[in-house]
Amino acid sequence: MAAVSLGGLSGPLWGGLADRYRLHRWLLAGGLLVTALGLALLPFTSGVPAWAGLALLESIGTAAAATVANLFVVELHPQSEWDRRIGWLQTFYGGGQVAGLLAAGVLSSVGFRAGLLTAAGLVALAVVPGWLTTYTPPGPLRPRPCPAAPRPQW
């Protein structure tokens, strides 16, 4: 779980790369593929270091895809629509998590390996609609400098 949380901290990196270099679609598809790879390799490994490394890989991919999904909302739609659209995005994201946990529960009776391979396959399949239904928002073609983080006022 620590590796999963650590990978989630990479979200700002993916958001910055997407915005600076206009890589939205590539990071969405790449994040999904990296997540699928981590899930697919997990049942063929043993030992805590390998599991932690693959959990980190999976969560880095998830962070990339989830971060870019939110960027599609804020960069392609007016601010007045953000709350509703992000709400729906989070609803579908949460629904997918619940459906995934239910499927994992059912597939666990078949075996641990089958559940992880099924999850990996479903995530890999998500690349197709993700790629076909999104496009990189228009923006500057030159890399933009990243603004400095605000300093605390003590």
Image (tube, helix red, strand yellow):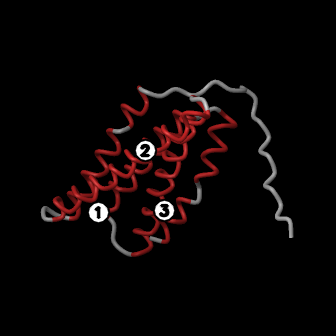
Helix, strand or loop for disc 2:
helix
* In the depicted structure, whether residue 35 falls above or below residue 47: above
Q: Position of residue 5 (x, y in %)?
A: 51, 65
Tell me the element at label 3: helix
Q: Residue furthest bottom?
A: 48
- Nearest the eye: 50 or 111: 111
Image marks 3 and 2: residues in contact by CB distance under 8 Å: no
Q: Residues within 10 Å of mark 2 (few under 14, many from 20)?
A: many
What is the x, y in percent for residue 92? Answer: 37, 45
Q: Nearer the viewer, mark 3 or mark 1?
A: 3
| Location of residue 14 in the rendering, given as x and y in whole percent from the top left corner | 60, 46
Task: Name the residue: 54% across, 35% down.
Answer: 73
- Can you identify the residue that label 3 sits on? 56
Q: Amino acid at mark 3?
A: Leu
Along the polypeptide, which appears first: circle 3 or circle 2? 2
Read off the residue under disc 1: 43
Please state which amino acid type lies under the numbered disc 2.
Leu
Disc marking residue 32: 2
- Cα separation between marks 3 and 1: 15 Å
In the rendered image, the vertical position of residue 85 relative to residue 12, given as above or below: above
Horizontally, is 142 left or right of 28 in the view?
Answer: right
